[in-house]
Amino acid sequence: WHHKLPLVWPPHEEAAEYINETFALVHAKQSKDSKRKAKGTVSDGGVLRPVKLSKKELYKAPTVEELNQLKEAENLFHCSILKMQMEELLKEVALSEHRKKLVDSFVQQITDFLQCVPESEVVELDDISWLSGVEVPFLLVPSTAKGKFHMEPPASINLVGSYPLGMCIKPKVSVDLAVTIPASILHPMDAINQRYSRKRALYLAGLARHLSFAKCVGSLHYSCLHGNRLRPILLLKPPGNDSSKVTLRIHAIPPPDFLKPSRFHPQKNNIRTEWFTGVANTEPPTPHYNSTVLGDHLPLSHLQFLSAISAQCPAFGEGVALLKVWLRQRELDQGAGCFCGFHASMLMAYLLSTHKVGKTMNPYQLLRNALNFFASTDLTENGITLAKNPDSKAVSRSDSSIYLLFLPSLPEFHAAFSVVFVDPSGHLNLLADMTAFTYKRIQHEASLSLTFWDDPTVDGFQALLMTPKSMLRTYDNVFKLVNLVKLQTSCKKLLLLNELMDHSGNYVLTALPFVLSLLQRGLEERIHLLVHSLPQDPEWKVNSAPPKHKDQPPLSIGLLLNLEHALSVLERGPPADNPKAAEFRQLWGSRSQLRRFQDGAITEAVLWSSSSISQRRFIVLKIITHLLELHADIPNSCIMFVGGQLDVVIGCGEEESLEVVQSYDDLSKKLWQLKDLPLSITSVQGAHQALRYTQVFPPVPVRLDYSFFDKKKNHLGLVPKGDQPCPCYIAPIKVIVHMEGSGKWPSEPMAICHVKAAFHICLRELLCKQHNYRCHATPGYLDVWKDGLVFRIQVAYHREPQILRENLTPEGMLIYRDNAEAQALELETLHKPFLTSTLHGLQQQYGCFGVVCRLAKRWLASQFLLEDIREEAADLLVASLFLHPAPFTSPSSPQVGFLRFFHLLSTFDWKNNPLIVNLNGKLTGISYIKNDFVASRESLPTMFIVTPSDKKVSVWTKEAPSVQMLQRAVMLAAESLRVLETQLDSGEKQDMRVAFRPPLEAYDVLIHLDSKQVPLLAKAVDPPVNTFRRGTHGGQPFASGGALPVIDYDPVRLYMSELREAFGDLALFFYDLYGGTVIAVLWKPAAFEPKPFKTSLMNARRVEVNDDVATTVPNVEAILQDFRIIGEGLVKRLELRTEKWVV
């Protein structure tokens, strides 16, 4: 990877010239004036060339059409680029003429072949012996049904769905072909007891058998229409290379007026209890079964309706296409109970027919109005209908007979279905299979889309239509229901026999809404939203038996958490004498107990045990498992919490961080109260990651085991005995103390350093005297040993960076010149404390911000990237996920934040855009920032991060990463995201560490270290079972006093700095800061090119003489020997991975 060419940043002048030429091309293309059309814009190879226009043509006044387009772009879009993006997207998803010709040809071949289906003898409905080579795509439960069946050629074959309307879009092109079953096969009584559905499946099987002999068919499979097992379909693909370009879906439908719609009223029964269960009983209504059969009667009338209404609005098809893309990116358009493309067309038709959108609106306006309708209309409460007179009697003429048909009312539909959207006939609920939870999800997504649509800081097009929203990346907690056969017992426990009969034995779809309602009751204030995955349409070969309900993939349940209540250990119920107390006890069972609270109230309550914040994240899981086991007989083994094991990688750090912050607050208070200081303190600011809750492994208060150490003669510190392993690593927590300005401060940099050293000595004496702290002062800092932690106090003077920039010219003039020393001091004393306090506030606002930062930095460290993408930059990357989450909501769990971090790092356009992190909402003029970035791109860092206090420099990424290291990070993040999501989605036992194990194949040398001398060994990704004593033991650390330990001592880090100093021009060195036992070495290819012999350039090189010319090349053997010598006692062995350095 390190040999790849670096990214090339285009010079600004060339970019400007290209943009001007592009607009000239667009200007010429749009103009109708023949004189303004440019000639020769296409080269011989068919490549577009920039249009060459004369000055007169270039500055000619715009036409009326051009002015209208500019006005529209100004009024409707943030900028013209959004309009262009949507236009390009529509071109991209539209079918090409070549694809249409392929589809038309394939449809014609299949239609011709289906016309000659052979006839068969009349047999009993249960007799399938005449079928050979194919299976019936139907679960025959119960196994018997009355009726006769035989095969005949179709009565008619018609294209239906989106393709004949011109609304079919890529990438997944599906064309629907309706094959009408001859009336002679059907019987007027086929509506009852699945007789029609079984005949439909048999007819489809007969077609499959016939098509299996067709040479024009590449592959032949069965599937179901939107997961409905009563509506199997045939999937055909053309042979060869065209197989991926189109899928033909064959639907078997009855003649349009075969059965009376009044038979399928939502309150009528069409499945007899005695036939389904074997026991005679009352006949409950079967609304879902009725809508399934009725839905097969209406495809042709729906096509006519949509064809008529789409002709009224020129942009109708493109508006529907945009809505389809929006639904597809949110995984809402496929599976059982989905809102598919057909529903999108019908919704747009409803908006048009009710004048909620205008006939002259463009696709952008149609999409926006559709989303606004979703967000403001609750179809679970107030259904809508496309029927013209929903409350009147309708008259239908069929077979010269007149039937008075009473249309079902909207309240009758609401009594039978969760979501109501009635078709133009007035009899069919288009959303009969949708659960209320899915519609609430659509409403939530629409509301969210509208909130960021007008936000100028958000790339609306990218967030709205280009970002896929998988369940794992969208919802804070995801649970999987595995072993779905257990839902059979749930149906019995919940007494759902009537509903099971209505769903024709599909116990998964029967139990799902009741299980979700149960969870909604139990979780209440803990969540903002509860959603479920849509069971996907099964697909199987025509010679295979249909899959059983239990064979479908696990069901996912997603939660958007309300962090104010989600982690609460107490579920407080009504008072004991309240009538609702019995309902509360019934819900929670034995977990509910009477408790008395401090306010004197005696109420029902449920208490969940947990000892840490990370354990409290599992309370939701405990609630779900308890409720499902109590009320639905679903055991714990069937519920899997996706991603709940991430804590094993970083441990429980929140409590440790809180202890550090509390100890720091106490120290800060005592520093403010110190007496007898020569100058007063103006500010005490933390400048350490632990003080903003983002340290991967926060410092832990330690109590020293003095038998492990030898005391030094000056009693200042402890060093381990000679035979002991490396002592535990004690990280100093940096604190910046600003002293007040005074005329007594010197104006020389060296004198300022001396004054600061004197302040360190003064602070040490006062802290020792007034608080009995053990301290150690140096010229650069003061270490304070307090509460088992070390605080490193650094005195700062606010004018010091300015003084460091002062320079005197030979003429005696004072000038200011920036330099690295002043920048480094500013970074440590100004930028770091400000960032720490700001991100500390962000943690107070978003409870899991710190955990996501820790996970992200643990991953960066494990992949050897944390020294390139430094820790402050990583914190800002994560902060952007919380401050600018579009198209998501801000993360409320570590898992979802971690996955989004991978997605951001791997997909953000680092080359062409700055990452804007609007801390405290103080950033304005976003467009100016982007323009400045484009203008200066060539001189700016590879990764550019903008904050309110850092708009032009990007101080945290100024030095690193390089282009190559950023490419490496992007590649590793994309692969880690793929691996982690695949594993999380599998429904099997998960190993979260898989994404944290670095690939070592690319490195040339591996230096294996003695784990005894690695102080952070216990923090490794895969820690050893047995670790070493590090000079500490359990117990409460002393608040003050005691000997100082060895501070900030990590032999691996010191060894790395020596290697880089000695061999940095020859190789790159990488290691995991947190317990890594391997240092990876990568030779620099340029270093191995022979160089002319010079005595001053012989470091780590040897002489080679060819044709009397002396050159030098790296002396690899000696370098490897030096690795061992420098690391004596630390290096265990060297592993040579390649021989490519031998020149």
Image: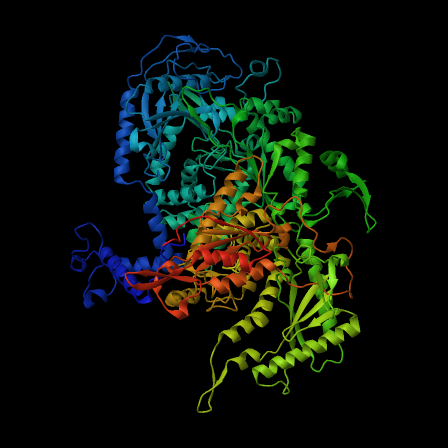
Left or right of 526 on screen, residue 998: left
Residues 400 and 887: in front is 887
When the figure is inspected, residue 647 is found, relative to residue 111, above or below; the finding is: below
Left or right of 795 on screen, residue 965: left
Q: Residue at x 37, y 18 (%)?
A: 399
Query: Where residue 1000 sits: x, y (%)?
Result: 48, 48
Left or right of 386 on screen, residue 586: right
Residues 697 and 987: in front is 697
Image colouring:
rainbow
Q: Is residue 458 among the parts visible in the rendering?
A: no
Left or right of 851 on screen, residue 769: right
Q: The C terminus appears in which quarter of the rendering?
A: bottom left
Q: Is residue 218 among the parts visible in the rendering?
A: yes
Q: Residue at x 25, y 35 (%)?
A: 101
Q: Total of numbered circles in the picture?
A: 0
When the figure is inspected, residue 670 is found, relative to residue 291, above or below; the finding is: below
Query: Where residue 154 sits: x, y (%)?
Result: 33, 19
When the figure is inspected, residue 104 is found, relative to residue 803, above or below; the finding is: above
Which quarter of the figure has residue 731? Answer: bottom right
Which quarter of the figure has residue 246? Answer: top left
Query: Where residue 932 sits: x, y (%)?
Result: 40, 68
Query: Where residue 1094 sits: x, y (%)?
Result: 37, 69
When the figure is inspected, residue 421 is found, relative to residue 947, above or below; the finding is: above
Residue sticking out furthest to the bottom: 811
